[in-house]
Image: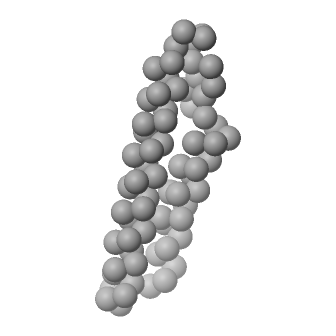
Amino acid sequence: MANPAGPWDSETVAHSDIASGLALALSVITTMLTWVFIKAEWLRTWWYTIPAAFTAATLLRLTLLAPEL
């Protein structure tokens, strides 16, 4: 977990937000692909746990573990 070096270090916060936003978008894409593959009966329903874990980790990073200035 990256913490800012001081009150002047807004880059760390911005980079953390960008990375978390990209991870959230990737988890949405993964969820949609999982849904397609489950509808095609190539995967079983327990595969939803993988994108759900990514989403939970991303939301945790965006809220509770986010660096603050």
In the image, what residue occupies the spot 60% across and 34% down? 66
Q: Quadrant of residue 64?
A: top right
* Residue ranking furthest to the bottom: 41
Say how many tags the image has: 0
* Colour scheme employed for the rendering of this structure: one colour
In the orientation shown, which residue stands out farthest toward the right?
64
Q: Is residue 63 left or right of residue 33?
A: right
- Residue at horizontal 54 percent and vertical 9 percent from the top: 8
Identified at 43% across, 49% down, the residue is 23
Which one is nearer the viewer's eye here, 34 or 17?
17
**Is residue 58 positioned above or below 39 on the image?**
above
Q: Looking at the picture, tell me which residue is in the foreground, 46 or 69.
A: 69
Residue 54 pos. (x, y %):
50, 57
Image quadrant of residue 68?
Answer: top right
Q: Is residue 13 above or below residue 49?
A: above
Q: Nearer the viewer, residue 18 or 56?
A: 18
Q: Find residue 59 and report its horizontal and vertical position in percent.
A: 58, 50
Image position, residue 61 (x, y; %) = 58, 42
Seen in the picture, residue 15 relative to 44 is either above or below; the reply is above
Give percent across and percent down for residue 35. 40, 78
Q: Residue at x 53, y 57 (%)?
A: 55
Quadrant holding the C terminus: top right
In this rendering, is residue 37 above or below 15?
Answer: below
Q: Quadrant of the N terminus?
A: top right
